[in-house]
Amino acid sequence: MRARPDSDLIVILCTAPDEVTAATLARGLVETRLCACVNAISPMKSFYRWQGKIEADTEVQLVIKTQHSRFDDVAAWLKANHPYDVPEIIALPAERVSHDYLEWAIGETS
């Protein structure tokens, strides 16, 4: 089932430098009802260019599930609470979501 356009579910990707930070961010997002659920996947190796140098770091991938309408609030909260100067905040549409999960997620983020 697909939700109404104003309540579509999205998945936001955000990396954290370690498991403690990931847990703090995940708990904060859920406690504030900005998202229904956060998965913290660890370890993960990230390769990127920062200040002219190629970096390779072990990070934790956060997979954040929320409503499309909450994206700006989630992004602002992450920017205010994340230790990185430029945190990864990438939203992907959840093309198909089971009715029960969607209803639960909307209830948790409304």
Image (spheres, helix red, strand yellow):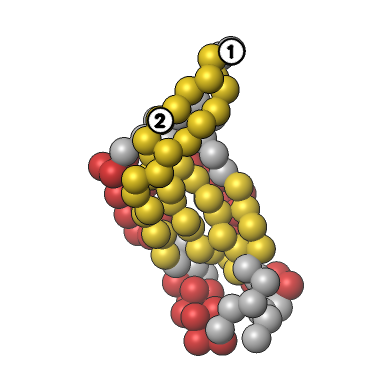
- Mark 2 is on which residue type? Asp
Q: Label 1 crowding class (10 Å Cα cut-off): few <14, some 14-19, many 20+?
A: few
Q: Is residue 94 left or right of residue 56?
A: right
The picture places residue 39, in percent across and down from the top left corner, at 39, 59
Along the viewing direction, whichever of 3 and 45 lies nearer the viewer: 45
Q: Label 2 crowding class (10 Å Cα cut-off): few <14, some 14-19, many 20+?
A: few
- Mark 1 is on which residue type? Gly
Disc 2 element: strand
Residue at (32% x, 54% y) in the render:
27
Disc 1 element: loop
Determine which quarter of the picture holds residue 89.
top right
- The residue indicated by pointer 2 is 57
Along the viewing direction, whichever of 70 and 38 lies nearer the viewer: 38
Residue at (64% x, 77% y) in the render:
96
The picture places residue 40, in percent across and down from the top left corner, at 37, 54
Determine which quarter of the picture holds residue 17.
top left
Residue 38 appears in the picture as rendered: yes
The picture places residue 63, in percent across and down from the top left corner, at 47, 56
The picture places residue 103, in percent across and down from the top left corner, at 53, 82
Q: Is residue 9 left or right of residue 64?
A: right
Q: Are marks 2 and 1 in contact (CB under 8 Å)?
A: no
Residue 81 appears in the picture as rendered: no
- The residue indicated by pointer 1 is 52
Query: Is residue 19 shown above or below 9?
Result: above
